[in-house]
Amino acid sequence: MGRYSEELANAGFEWLLGDVLVGMTIQDGNEKWDLKQGTESELQLALMRYVLKEKQEVPF
């Protein structure tokens, strides 16, 4: 179960980095992710918008 959870978490982070934060991250040839220099504020706003959008869509 632990291994499956790790795979799901990795897939979620890869989707977030590649789709939600597109243009603010880079992936090298070894599939490691990094932030583009100077996009820290943009990245924070994008994450906040994403969380707010998801929170509004889920009935909690």
Image (cartoon, rainbow, N blue to C red):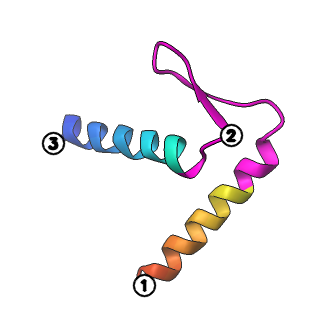
Residue 43 in magenta?
yes
Image coordinates of residue 45 in percent, x first then y, are 73, 58
Q: Which residues are magenta?
A: 20-44
At x 46%, y 20%, the residue is: 31
Disc 1/disc 3 C-alpha distance (Å): 27 Å
Disc 3/disc 2 C-alpha distance (Å): 32 Å
| Relative height, residue 8 to residue 56 (above, below) | above
Who comes first in sequence, dot 3 or dot 2?
Answer: 3
Q: Name the secondary structure under disc 3.
A: loop
Disc assigned to residue 1: 3
At x 63%, y 57%, the residue is: 47
Q: Residues within 10 Å of mark 3 (few under 14, many from 20)?
A: few
Q: Name the secondary structure under disc 2.
A: loop
- Residue projecting furthest to the top: 30
Q: What residue is disc 1 on?
A: 60
Q: Amino acid at mark 2?
A: Met
Q: What residue is disc 2 on?
A: 24
At x 21%, y 34%, the residue is: 3
Q: For this rendering, which residue is in front, 6 or 54?
A: 54
Q: Name the secondary structure under disc 1.
A: loop
Q: Nearer the viewer, mark 3 or mark 2?
A: 2
Q: Amino acid at mark 3?
A: Met
